[in-house]
Image (tube, grey):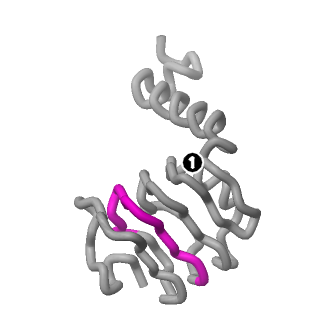
Amino acid sequence: MKFKDTKYGDMSIKSYQGDIIDISMTNLTSLEGCPPIVIGNFDCSKNNLILLEFAPKKIKGYFSCKENKEIKDAKQQIIKCQIEAKEYWTDEGYFSFEDIKEEFLKFEFLNKTVKSKGFRTLLGIDK
């Protein structure tokens, strides 16, 4: 089941202004259809997620993805997917955005550089 199949529907092009999006224990396998911005908290714990792809990019409160047994390296997925939240609750532990800010910004910079210059140019294949 995807996020867009929940009671919230497809919110991929609008922000969510409520206190919390609670989609815990809904047998989700994908976050496809999530809003890009959540003003409150986002709880997708206790599901069947493997990836955090399609998660909101900005969450003003906490982001919880605990007890998704198939999620490997949640912290690295958070950085790779550029999920910015005040706090993160994962099976790897609790941490804040300040705890990962440096890694987050390095990944963001590298990603922008690759997109602007092209991967082949960075490797020296195309000059």
Q: List x then y, in percent, for residue 10.
A: 26, 73
Q: Name the amino acid type tagged 1.
A: Lys
Residue indicated by mark 1: 80
Residue drawn at (68%, 66%) of the image: 90
Residue drawn at (28%, 60%) of the image: 15
33 lies left or right of 113: left
Residue range corresponding to the magenta coloring: 32-46
> 83 above or below 10?
above
Q: Quadrant of residue 73?
A: bottom right
Q: Depth check: 122 or 73 in front?
A: 73
Residue drawn at (42%, 85%) of the image: 1
Q: List x then y, in percent, for residue 8.
A: 30, 79
Q: Depth check: 90 or 117 in front?
A: 90
> 122 above or below 27?
above
> Does the stretch in magenta take in 96?
no
Q: List x then y, in percent, for residue 29.
A: 50, 79
Q: Depth check: 40 or 3 in front?
A: 40
> Does the stretch in magenta take in 45?
yes
Residue drawn at (50%, 25%) of the image: 120
Q: List x then y, in percent, for residue 70.
A: 67, 75
Q: Depth check: 5 or 118 in front?
A: 5
The overriding secondary structure of the stretch rendered in magenta is loop
Residue most extreme to the front = 19
Neighbourhood count class around disc 1 (C-alpha, 10 Å): few under 14, some 14–19, many 20 upward: some
